[in-house]
Amino acid sequence: MATPPSRRSILSLYSMTLRTSRSFSSYNFRTYFIRRTREKFRTLQNETDSTKIRSMYTDAVAELAVLRRSATVNQIYGGWRLAVEDMKKPESVTERGDN
C-alpha cells in the first residue's frame, strides 16, 4: 500500500499551483483558477483517508501540468485588460464633494 504524500510535498504542490494560477494574464481565468486551487486544497486538507489523499495528490500533479500549459497559452494570447483590473482599491477611492 502506498504511503500518502508528506505535508511538505502537498504544501509545495499548493504553492506551485497557486503561483501558476496567478500567472494567467486574463483576469477571469486568473481569479477562477486561484479560487479553484484554494477550494481543492481545502478539501485535500480535510481528508483523512490515505488512499483518497494519494489519489487527490496525483490528480493535482497532473492538473498542474495542464494548468502550466494553459497559462503559457493565455500569456501569449491574453487580450486586453478589463476595467475591473484597473480599478483602485475601495479604501483609496475618495468621495465626491459635489453632493
Image (cartoon, rainbow, N blue to C red):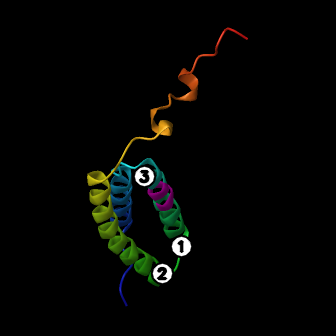
Above or below, 88 against 4 in this view is above
Q: What residue is disc 2 on?
A: 52
Image location of residue 55, percent across then percent down = 42, 81
Residue neighbourhood size for the residue with mark 2, other residues' Cα within 10 Å, grouped as few (<14), some (14–19), many (≥20): few
Q: Indicate which disc, 3 or 2, sits on the residue closer to the N terminus.
A: 3
**Residue farthest to the right, as pictured:** 99
Which residue is nearer to you in this view: 19 or 90? 90
Which quarter shows the C terminus?
top right
Image location of residue 30, percent across then percent down = 42, 52
Image location of residue 88, percent across then percent down = 50, 28
**Labelled pair 2, 1 in contact (Cβ < 8 Å):** yes
Residue neighbourhood size for the residue with mark 1, other residues' Cα within 10 Å, grouped as few (<14), some (14–19), many (≥20): few
Give the magenta range. Answer: 32-36
Q: Amino acid at mark 1?
A: Glu
Q: What residue is disc 3 on?
A: 30
**Alpha-carbon distance for marks 2 and 1?**
7 Å
Q: Is residue 24 magenta?
A: no
Which quarter shows the N terminus?
bottom left
Q: Amino acid at mark 3?
A: Arg
Could you say whether the residue bearing mark 3 is in a helix, strand or loop?
helix
**Alpha-carbon distance for marks 3 and 2?**
27 Å
**Labelled pair 1, 3 in contact (Cβ < 8 Å):** no
Going by the image, does 98 lie left or right of 7? right
Kindly report which numbered mark, 3 or 2, lies closer to the viewer in this rendering.
Answer: 3
Q: Indicate which disc, 1 or 3, sits on the residue closer to the N terminus.
A: 3
Q: Amino acid at mark 2?
A: Lys
The residue shown at (53%, 73%) is: 47
Q: What residue is disc 1 on?
A: 47
**Alpha-carbon distance for marks 1 and 3?**
26 Å
The residue shown at (53%, 75%) is: 48
